[in-house]
Image (cartoon, rainbow, N blue to C red):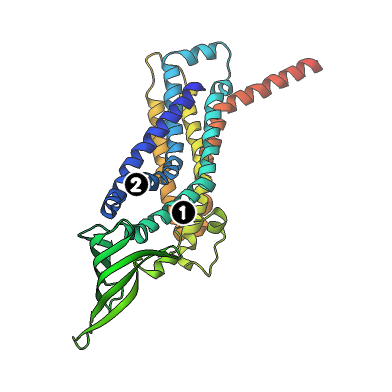
Amino acid sequence: MRQLFLALIATTGGLSALIWLTQSLRFVSLVVGRGLSLRVFLELTSLMVPSFVAVVLPITTFVVTLFVYHRLSGDRELTVMQAAGLSPFALARPGLICATVAMVVTFTLNLWIVPASYHEFKQYEFQIRNKMAAFMLQDGVFTKVSDALTVYVRERGHDGSLKGIMIEDDRVANSRATIFAERGTMLVVNDQPRVVLYDGSRQEIDHRTGRLTMLLFDRNTIDLTSSKNQENRSRDASEMSLSELLHPDLTQINIRDRGKLAVEGWRRITTPLTAFSFAMIALVAILRGAFSRHGNITRPLGAILSVVGLLALNLMLQNLAGRNMALIPLILLESAAPAFICAVLLFGPEIRAGRETAAIVRQTQEG
């Protein structure tokens, strides 16, 4: 039990860290380009870690169970325990407990922690892209606040005052403007970054006539978010709760996305079952079969190929079920059936032997 849990924690942590490292690289340019700190980068990317753990935990449970039991078999420890009279169920009990714990943890991650953390991640990313970046204006630098908004500040004071401001505002396609101001001040209104400009001008070109129009102002306020419509962004399926996925509000979603939402909901339910099924495959590969003095690589290799095949089949079923919701029950069957089949193969002879022994005892007592 100790070997299983220590190996499971180490393997899951190491693999999750590796995935976090590779996935977080795509956010380096976002953070560096916005001039944000290392703390912001770590806070943003750490919100993705629960989803990584939920994905790798069923696989690491299989790998750890297979490795630990195979090592026990190679060191002849399983042979000694079997000779001492331990049943297959007694030998498999530590692996079953480890698989059950992994299944419960995956359920907790999929149903509560991952949706909440992914929602926070999307909110934080949105805040960085559309709000926080506006406060990272640097002296003498053209800061690209968004794809359609560029700000230049000649000088910035510690109190938030700005001097020598130029803004290129292309957020409205037919009304692109260049704004100049002698000075300005950064403000936050309703959690939105704004800059109040003083003594400036707003220049636009009428594309129909080609004439330049200029508006002089003493005071003007500019919203520095990339788009007001983005404030009410549509939520991703990974952010929704299980009830929202299985019983969506059809007035809020596209009818074509209903199958994808249902598949996502059933994926959260069935993925934890695969952790138990994969562990059972590993137990059957090691505990069932004749002992070989020279070792046997065939059964572990067969178990690995079986798990790879089940993962590929699961992905295929999810893609098909997204188009045809009648195939969704096959996802549940594919996740739970291997555990049941392996339980019959591993514990079936023991159960039958117990029944036969009980029948002999009854006959003896009756005789």
- Vertical order, 109 against 125 (above or below): above
Task: Name the residue nearer the viewer: 314 or 169.
Answer: 169
The kind of secondary structure element at disc 1 is helix
- Vertical order, 95 against 174 (above or below): above
Q: Which residue is mark 1?
A: 119
Q: Position of residue 236 (x, y in %)?
A: 44, 58
Q: How many marks?
A: 2
Type of amino acid at the residue the image marks with label 2: Phe
- Vertical order, 344 against 35 (above or below): above
Q: Residue at x 58, y 19 (%)?
A: 87
Q: Residue at x 30, y 73 (%)?
A: 198
Q: Residue at the bottom extreme?
A: 209
The kind of secondary structure element at disc 2 is helix
Q: Position of residue 227 (x, y in %)?
A: 36, 68
Does the image show residue 335? Answer: no
Task: Name the residue nearer the viewer: 308 or 110.
Answer: 110
Does the image show residue 44? Answer: yes
Q: Residue at x 40, y 13 (%)?
A: 293
Quarter of the image holding residue 132? bottom left
Q: Which residue is mark 2?
A: 41
Quarter of the image holding residue 197? bottom left
- Packing grade of label 1 (10 A; few <14, some 14-19, many >=20) is many
